[in-house]
Amino acid sequence: MNAKILYYLLENTSKNIKKKYLKLAIDATGLHIEDGSYHYHKELGETAKIRKNVKLSAAIDTQTQLVTAVKIRKSKASDTIDFKGLVKKTAKAKPIKIVVAERL
């Protein structure tokens, strides 16, 4: 799926939430996108440490549990980099009452 289509769908989902204000939770996770674990490649004799990771940051309305905004990065990065962008994207669609996140 094209990223622009995903962002468009998420923005319209936020607009259709029937709450006056959103209560957001923001978190990120790293995804490993290789064909096997490091230990699997080591057993095969492929000991080069080539790690391909993707970072997914998401804003979620805690009342409806709907994802309101996402940011996908190809590199490892701190969660704080995407925080403002996720809040701004969500705020365009619906006012936000509170934002909860891990320690920044």
Image: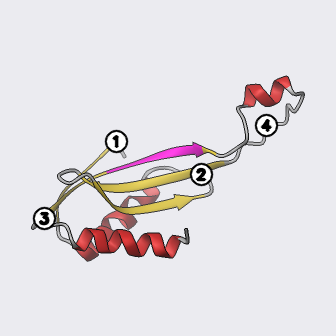
Q: In this view, does 52 lie above or below 23?
A: above
Decide which of 67, 54 is in the foreground and name it. 67
Residue under label 1, please give it. 103
* Mark 2 → mark 4, Cα distance in angstroms: 16 Å
Q: What element carries label 3?
A: loop
Q: Earlier in the sequence, mark 1 or mark 2?
A: 2
Q: What residue sits 49% from the left and 75% below the top?
A: 4
Q: Which of marks 3 and 4 is in front?
A: 3
* Mark 2 → mark 3, Cα distance in angstroms: 31 Å
Q: Is residue 62 above or below residue 12?
A: above
Relative side of 33 to 48, left or right: left
Q: Is the magenta stretch mostly helix, strand or loop?
A: strand
Q: How many numbered marks are there?
A: 4
Q: Which of marks 3 and 1 is in front?
A: 3
Neighbourhood count class around disc 3 (C-alpha, 10 Å): few under 14, some 14–19, many 20 upward:
some
Neighbourhood count class around disc 2 (C-alpha, 10 Å): few under 14, some 14–19, many 20 upward:
some
- Residue 27 shows which numbered tag? none
Q: What residue sits 33% from the left and 73% below the top?
A: 11
Amino acid on which the number 4 mark rests in the picture: Lys
Q: Magenta region: which residues?
A: 26-31
Q: Residue 13's quadrant in the figure?
A: bottom left
Q: Is residue 56 magenta?
A: no
Residue under label 2, please give it. 54
Decide which of 59, 67 is in the foreground and name it. 67
- Residue 21 shows which numbered tag? 3
Amino acid on which the number 2 mark rests in the picture: Val
Q: Residue 47's quadrant in the figure?
A: top right
Q: Which of marks 3 and 1 is nearer the N terminus?
A: 3
Q: Which of marks 2 and 4 is nearer the N terminus?
A: 4
* Mark 3 → mark 4, Cα distance in angstroms: 46 Å
